[in-house]
Amino acid sequence: SRPRIVVLGSLNMDMVLRVPHMPVAGETLLGRDLRHVPGGKGGNQAVSCARQGAQVCLLSCVGRDAYGEQLLASLQGDGIDVSHVMQASDAATGVAVISVDDAGQNQIVVLAGANQWLSVPEDLLESLLRDAQFVVLQFETPLAEVEKTLRIARKVGCRVALNPSPMQAFPQAWWSGIDVLVVNETEASALSRLAVGTPQQAAVAARQLLANGIARVVVTLGANGAVVCDADGTRWHEAVQVQAVDSTAAGDTFLGALTVRLAQGAPLDDATQWAMRAAAICVTRAGAQPSIPHAAEVEQLTSATRWSRI
Ligand code: ATP
């Protein structure tokens, strides 16, 4: 079955620089090349959902400029419905300057631009969420839009997947409206106020976050895999071993793949295994949206990963 998923989020044109190492303050570095690659968390998550076979509607905002046109054309190439993407008249399309070093680590500066002006009419949002199994949210768009979406999702019974990135504090009242929260180490640590470096620490933090009244928590740990927590307890899934080239969009690939599997009725551990394989493929390729795999590629990656209760 092809689940219907609405993604409300950002679109950015990524300017990707390859650097030998991350520059420190005051340092001048020679980069190797500059590429323009479609990105932005909302766009990336939409692409991940679409390549996993979902019918995706993206709610976003671009400027009236060439980057905006290129981003929309690229998303349409993935069969994503961009008919409700807004065009801001006074703001440029969002841009991210991404430095990637030889170890595949990245450092990102985002200029939100038109993303700050995203404002979806309530009646449109309600009619879209009524038909969708999931709405996917992150924090690169105004929090007022996130709050509005949570309220409407609750009203019409649409499940919510939230990736609170870039991390901002959010009201206590939001927790009970979230079906699955996906956080990396930094976000897990900020929300729980606990140190999160090891899988054991992630498990403690995940249990604490779950106690806020949320159904499922997933803490992604990069090359250390992910810790998942629900009413059935806490499990650690080891990552698929790959040669990392560029981790950009690994988290977004993970979230998209996880959401599609959950929408199809998979148990949390099965969905996590699938999402980890998708994310592992993503880190072996450069760039944001071009690096996100299709379901058929994930199917072919048969390397099993271990998981256990923690
Ligand atoms: P990013 O901001 O780079 O997109 P993130 O910080 O949101 O990433 P991570 O925890 O780094 O998220 O990665 C998400 C998932 O991607 C991990 O749970 C893991 O499954 C996979 N992953 C990331 N890095 C690696 C790696 N080096 N090897 C294998 N899998 C990886």
Image (tube, rainbow, N blue to C red):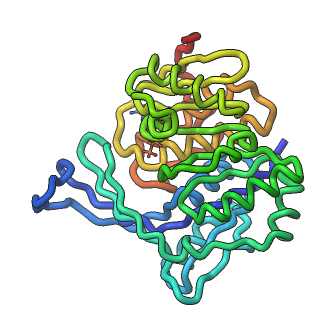
Q: Residue furthest left?
A: 27
Residue found at x 75% / y 44%: 177
Residue 57 appears in the rendering: yes
On the image, which quarter does residue 195 sit in? top left
Instruction: Give coordinates of residue 68: x percent, y percent.
Output: 54, 77
Q: Is residue 178 above or below residue 32?
A: above
In the displayed structure image, the side of residue 57 where residue 30 appears, left or right: left
Residue 239 appears in the rendering: no
In the displayed structure image, the side of residue 151 where residue 309 appears, left or right: left
Instruction: Give coordinates of residue 92: x percent, y percent.
Output: 48, 81
Residue found at x 74% / y 35%: 262
Q: Residue furthest bottom?
A: 89
Quadrant in the picture for the C terminus: top right
On the image, which quarter does residue 307 sit in? top right
Residue found at x 26% / y 56%: 18
Quadrant holding ligand 1? top left
Residue found at x 64% / y 68%: 60
Q: Is residue 167 above or below residue 28?
A: above
Quadrant in the picture for the N terminus: top right
Instruction: Give coordinates of residue 292: x percent, y percent.
Output: 53, 48
Instruction: Give coordinates of residue 36: x percent, y percent.
Output: 40, 68
